[in-house]
Amino acid sequence: MSKLLALLALPALVAGHGAVNWPPPRNAIDGSLPHWKNAPICQANDGSCPSVYDGGRVEKTCPSWDHKTNKAGAQNGQSCFWFNAGSIIGCDKPDGATRGAFIWKTINPHTNEGGCDCGEVPCTKTKGNCVADGWWVQQFSHCPTKDGTPYDGPKSKAKATICSKELRTLNTDADCGAADDWFYYTPWRAPGTSPLFDSCGVAGGHPATEDCEFGGCYKNTTNAVLGDFGSKKLPKQSYNVTWQAGSHVEVSWNIMANHGGGYQYRLCPAGSTLDEDCFQKTPLWRRSWHGWWAANGGQWRGGIGGGGRREHKGQSGGDNGGGEAE
C-alpha cells in the first residue's frame, strides 16, 4: 500500500473562523491542556450557546465535533484562532487588523457596546439606541502601507475571479464588483491569490500586539503564544491516520464565523516547506459532502480524493486548519 505523508489544510483562500476536525489538526495542540481537556461545552442545538469569544463559557475555545464521543467537545483547543488577519486580494501582505466588511456592526451610544438591532442589513442608519458603525460597511479594498499601517496604502487593483452567486456565501444578491459587493476583495473571491503571514496560520491572526479585536486573540500556553507562526511553531503530530494514495477519505471541519468565505482542501508533504507554493500543487477534489448543524457552530464533513482541482462552494470559511495524514 502506498502511503501519503502530508499536512492537510484548509488553505488561506477563506474568510472566517473555523478549523479542520478530522484528521485532528496540528493547531489543536492545546486541546490536551487542562483548560480545554476539562472544558464544559454547551450541547444545545437551538442557537443559544455562547460564541467562541464569550469568556463566560470557556475562554478561547473552538468547540468542534468529537468523533469519539459523538458530541461537541473542546479537543480542538484554539485551532480556530490560527489564521491570517487582514488578507486582501491584490496586496503584497496582510495588514493584521481589518477583517472584511461587518455589515451588522452597530454601537449603543449609551453603553458603547455593539450588538443592537438597527433594523436593516447592512446597518446604515440610526434607530433608537442603535447607531450604525459606518466604517465597517465598505469593501475593504486598500492595502497596508509599506511600513505595515493597516488600510492606509493604495487600493487593490485585483479583480475577483469568483462572481457567480452560486459560489458566493454572503451578500450574494449584490452585482459582482458593485459598490455594495462588500466582500469583493476577500480571499475567497480570487482563490489562491491572497497574501499570508503563514500558510499554517498565526496564533491570533497577526504578529504579536495587544490588539484582541474580532477574534485576533490567543490564550498563551506552553505550546504557543500570540503571534507565533504555525509552520514554524506547531510540531508534527501522530494520530495513526493512514491514507492510501488515490483513495477516497473522510474529512470534517467546523465553522465559527462566516465572513463571506469558501474553502478547499490541499496537501503538502510533511517534509516540505509548508508554504503556498507547496499547498497549491496538490488540491484535493470533492467526491461528496454533507453537513449538519450542531452545538457551537456548523459541522461539515465529506469525502475527498486526490487528483485534479475543483473549487466548490462552502457555507463559510475556515482558517488554515491542518491535520497529519500518515
Image (cartoon, rainbow, N blue to C red):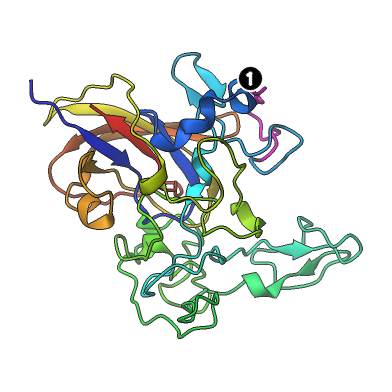
Eyeballing the image, is 297 above or below 11? above
Residue 320 on image: x %, y %: 40, 47
Work out whether residue 249 or residue 178 is closer to the camera in this orientation and state it. 249
Q: Quadrant of the N terminus?
A: top left
Residue drawn at (52%, 74%) of the image = 139
Work out whether residue 133 or residue 93 is closer to the camera in this orientation and state it. 93
Is 43 magenta? The answer is yes
Q: Which residue is mark 1?
A: 38
Residue drawn at (34%, 77%) of the image = 158
Three-letter amino acid code at the position of disc 1 = Asn
Residue that lies at the very extreme toward the left in this rendered image: 1
Residue 260 on image: x %, y %: 48, 57
Residue drawn at (39%, 28%) of the image = 24
Residue drawn at (45%, 14%) of the image = 68
Q: Quadrant of the C terminus?
A: top left
Q: Main secondary structure of the magenta part?
A: loop
Residue 71 on image: x %, y %: 54, 19
Q: Quadrant of residue 213?
A: bottom right
Residue that lies at the very extreme toward the bottom in this rendered image: 154
Is 44 magenta? The answer is yes
Residue that lies at the very extreme toward the right in this rendered image: 110
Work out whether residue 247 or residue 324 is closer to the camera in this orientation and state it. 324
Eyeballing the image, is 39 above or below 82? above
Judged left or right of residue 144, residue 305 is left
Query: Helix, strand or loop at disc 1?
Result: loop
Judged left or right of residue 263, residue 219 is right
The local crowd at label 1, few if under 14, some if 14 to 19, many if 20 or more residues have their Cα within 10 Å, is some
Q: Quadrant of residue 219?
A: top right
Judged left or right of residue 190, residue 261 is right
Residue segment shown in magenta: 38-51
